[in-house]
Image (tube, grey):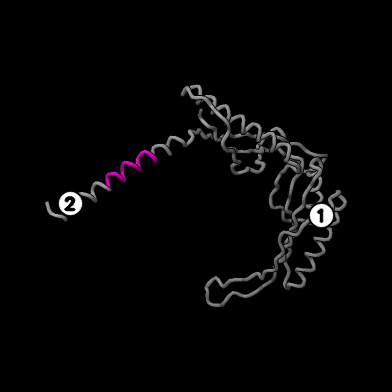
Amino acid sequence: MDRRSLAALGLTGLAAAATLTATPSLSQESKTMPRVISLNGHGEVKARPDMAVINVGVTTQAQTARDALSENTRAMEKIFASLKAAGIEGKDIQTSNFSVNPRYQYDPNNVQPPRVIGYDVSNTVSVSVRKLDTLGQVLDKVVSEGSNQINGIMFAIAETGKLEDEARKLAFADAERKAKLYAETTRITLGQIMSMSEGNFQPPQPVFHGKAMRADSAGAVPIAEGEQTVAIDVNVTWEIK
């Protein structure tokens, strides 16, 4: 056997030796990795809302932008006064939209270009009604004072901290229940908690109940506030002994 064959044989032997020495260390490392079980938990709490946010405003039309704006301003001043009379504080009223747009007349034959025949002015405010039992009266008042735009009602819970904490307890209990069930089924023993994280927080969601429909007083707008759901999701990881 020549020298080149001996050299090749020597390199092969070295490679085999390196492989044999590396294998036990990888196996030993895998044995030190803890076995874990990770599960999600969901918790939710329902409660009646105690406030509402409404968007009310006025849209006016006139031949000139100045006239449309002046008419809109007079109407909005009446609405502001009615909100103040209803006990709404200034911090709970915020302008959410204001626009001035031309109004066009189009040639049905598409011969002449569109021409401006007037202007539309729109002013909308977002109002937080913290005394929910007065909401129907507030809606009635603003419409009576000239509001011709009410863009939806959003019910809410002013303070959700305690409800969120209760939902967190329920979420963890749900994850723990699942973990114990799997442990009993698979005959494993749960160890200490290795990690825990809170998933996406879900803001209060409406739960509708038609029977909640009521009128605040004679002539007031009937309101159905229903319930809100506060939900929390958690992920918990336990060590398997």
Q: Residue at x 86, y 56 (%)?
A: 81
**Residue 138: image location, x then y, percent:** 80, 48
Residue found at the very far bottom of the displayed protein: 112
Q: Which of the pair 12/127 is nearer the observer?
A: 12
- Name which residue lies at 47% across and 22% down: 187
Say which quarter of the image contains residue 125. bottom right
* Membership of 17 in magenta stretch: yes
Amino acid type at image mark 2 = Leu
Q: Report which residue position mark 1 lands on.
A: 91
Q: Is the residue marked by circle 1 packed among few (<14), some (14-19), or many (20+) residues within 10 Å?
A: few
Q: Quadrant of residue 51?
A: top right
The reply to whether dot 2 and dot 1 touch (C-beta < 8 Å) is no
Horizontal and vertical percent position of residue 184: 50, 22
Label whose residue precedes the other's in the sequence (2 or 1): 2
Label 2 packing within 10 angstroms: few (<14), some (14-19), many (20+): few
Q: Nearer the viewer, residue 174 or 111?
A: 174
Q: Which mark is residue 171?
A: none
Amino acid type of the residue tagged 1 in the rendering: Lys
Magenta range is 15-25
Secondary structure, magenta segment, majority class: helix
SS under mark 2: helix
Q: Nearer the viewer, mark 2 or mark 1?
A: 2
Estimate the x, y position of residue 25 in percent, counting from the top left: 39, 40
Identify the residue under disc 2. 6
Using the image, determine if residue 52 lies above or below residue 74: above
